[in-house]
Amino acid sequence: MSRNNVIRAGAVLLFLVLCHNPPGTLLAQSGYAATTMAGLSNGGRNPEKPYAAAGDRAYLIGTQDGNFPDIGDHVPGEMGGLWVHPIKLIDGFWVTLADSSTGQVARLRKSREFINYPYGNRFRYGPVLDSLEVERFQFSPDGHPGVVVQYILTNRAARARRVGFHLSVKSDLLPVWYSDKLGIVDAPDTVTWDAAAGRFVARDTRHPWFAVWGAPDIPGQPIRPEPAATQGQGVASAAGYRIEIPAGGVSSLTLVFAGSASAQAQAESAYAYIAQHQESLLAQKKARYAALLERSRIRIPDQRLQEVYNWVKVNTEWLVRDVPGMAYGLSAALPEYPWWFGTETYSLQALLAAGNAELARQTLRLLRDQSVKANGNGRIIHEVTTNGGVSNPGNTQETAQFILTAARVYDWTGDSAFARDMYPAMRQGLRWLLTDMDQNRNLFPEGYGIMEVTGLNAELIDVAVYTQQALARTAAVAEILGESGDAARYRKQAAQLAARIEDRFWIEEETSYADFYGTRAQAVSVAEGAARQLGLKGEDKLTPRERELIRYYRQLKERFAAMPDSSRGWLTNKNWVIATPMETGIAPRERAIRALDKIRRENVGEHGPFLSATERLAMMTISTGVQAVAEGNYGRTDEALWYIDRIVRTFNRTVPGSISEMMPDWGSFTIAWTAYGVVIPLVEHVFGIQPDAGTRTVTFQPHLPSGWEDMSIEDVPVGSNLISFRRAKTARGVEYTVEATEGGWTFVLKEKSAAGMRYYLNGKAVSIPAGGLRMSGHRNQVLVIPR
């Protein structure tokens, strides 16, 4: 086939680099140092479930048996394969091995084991072609739009072997979801074999989208591809290579895939760089994950929870998307939501507590900037794809959550420049909430909240609560920035709104906060909408439970219609967000405890709170996590740990090292906001860390679960300092240790003083005042001795 021969039908720009590295070059590095974690095996389970080899510029999604079927819903069947956002490059690749001596052929279609590492994946195929064992290791280097795949062939036979390695690739250059609304429409691909360079180049026939695949170190030849089973306008192509394996020896074959959404030269340059630097890129990726795990590292008696805590930090890193010319920030989930969401502020609060403030800052800037482009009025978008498509300009609570999270950055970092940069957006967002979205000027913004239930477009509990928090936290930032007039106004409105939430949302006879505050007509509309939403699938497809709920909502509609026509709080769907007054700690303790107990009694399933009365089979990590945070706010640590344990129990159910969006094992296989329900309760409630980096003060108010005695958290970034806090039960009593890398800070230990206890600070007897024991210096030890 000549240089200019073109294969038409659907394009794939995949760059395969084939080189004889020293045996096991990449695979030999696939374990962490002692401070990091080893990979987790699927044990042969879930072979048809997806996984990701994730990097910030590219990620590869296939199934745990090593294949690449059509998966996903947003772009139907196309959410897997190799993505370099905002485009997809290929559907996948498939390998066939042929023993030239015996004529035996083996298609690598089913791996026996899948092992997931924070930085990559390994597939073990076991023996093929008699005594030839095959493994595949792959990773996506950060900062580069490509993926490295290495096959390791171990010859257990007493004879040397020559093996034909046949690689088939199916291109599928296409744009991200929602692109058609922007006038970007996929076209067929073409694939060209470049004989001089020994590589394939694929492009979309309508757009400058490219992928490259080749073998610069070992010559290959194009061969007839097998028909590809995947959908789309891509092209199947194939190349053959020869591998010599000595008796009892090992040989390796390394492939590199790279691409570009703008130019062929960029795709080729990326391929060349990755091919040349693959070993150092892997070492850099491992070192970066090791550093990530060192920040805010914990040691607790519950080893399983400690493992999950580490992995949710890793999962979050898998979801970083870097799209040059567009944005850099934390995306939501894989495979369905690899773009950016206003609701990601849950995840950003976890990032702060886990020691990754810079990613939180960059994501907040991303949301602000994209919201200015889309809305320009202070409203924060709901989601924006990696080519700038905004399908929903924003649910009301997302603006409030953005504001309160931007303020939380200052608590952890003391970054006044960032606060000043964000303050105009915070102020404009509050103006939008309290003018455009508060038509009756009662401080309750209207509009949809996080629960997008048909008809529930009213003054919602989550919107009201998060707006109250946005006001309170913006007041604090305004004070720091010298905006005293704003600070006084926001502080007053925050106090008024907190009082009104208690007055108008609390329903004493239900021992619960209402879903929303509004008129009888709105309540009737919500009940009617819930019944209609349940019935959308058709009468013949309804479950008995769904029929029962439809009857319930119709009866509720009739009951509401017969009630006096006045504004009040209404409890219709019992959405999980009725816990938000407790999640934020604004609910009075007596009410909070009663409401939390009732939720646990009546609205909690095997894995946590039901999403709503209409979704009693659905539970999510975010709703369970919010409940854990709510319990922690009131010092109910055992109850908080009970909810966290619901999350922990779903760990590894779908993908080793991760937790699914919908508990226990469906939806996206990894999602960022899971971290909220694990990191926040542990760091801010169990360890009790309350940062105030602006005043160089950190308060510790630990709440130990039953049975816990010794625990520590180390190298927690607060401002420019690194803080460590330990608690240990010794023969003399309980010893607390606080260490810091910088001087000039104040540390406050809040320990519930009890009669008969003696307290010593650095060997000197002290008493603990009501506001807590104040300490300074790089290292402090507090010993509590019972009399």
Image: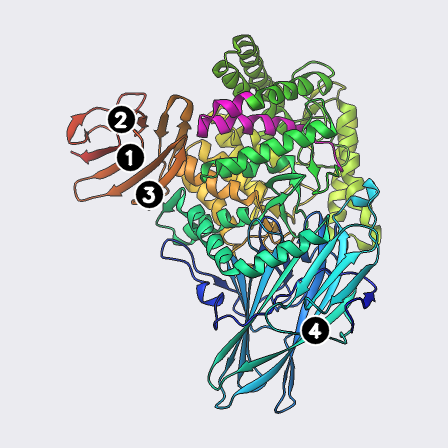
Q: Secondary structure at mark 3?
A: strand
Q: Is residue 399 in sight in this rendering? A: yes
| Tag shown at residue 712 | 3
Q: Secondary structure at mark 4?
A: strand
- Where does the image place residue 66, in percent across and percent down from the top left? 62, 68
Q: Nearer the viewer, mark 1 or mark 4?
A: 4
Q: Secondary structure at mark 2?
A: strand
Give, as a three-letter code, the residue at label 3: Ser
- Where does the image place residue 495, in percent across and percent down from the top left? 54, 15
Left of 786 or right of it: where is 116? right
Q: Which residues are magenta?
A: 391-420
Q: Residue furthest front?
A: 196
Q: Are marks 2 and 1 in contact (CB under 8 Å)?
A: yes
Q: Are marks 3 and 4 in contact (CB under 8 Å)?
A: no
Residue 281 higher or lower than 99, as above or below? above
Which circle's residue, 2 or 1, is located before the other in the chain?
Answer: 1
Give, as a three-letter code, the residue at label 1: Val
The residue pinned by badge 4 equals 239
The residue pinned by badge 2 equals 775
Between 137 and 237, the one lying in front of the other is 237
The residue pinned by badge 1 equals 738
Which circle's residue, 1 or 4, is located before the other in the chain?
Answer: 4
Task: Tell me where residue 364 sits by quadrant.
Answer: top right
Q: Is-magenta flag for residue 408?
A: yes
Task: Tell me where residue 275 sits by quadrant.
Answer: bottom right
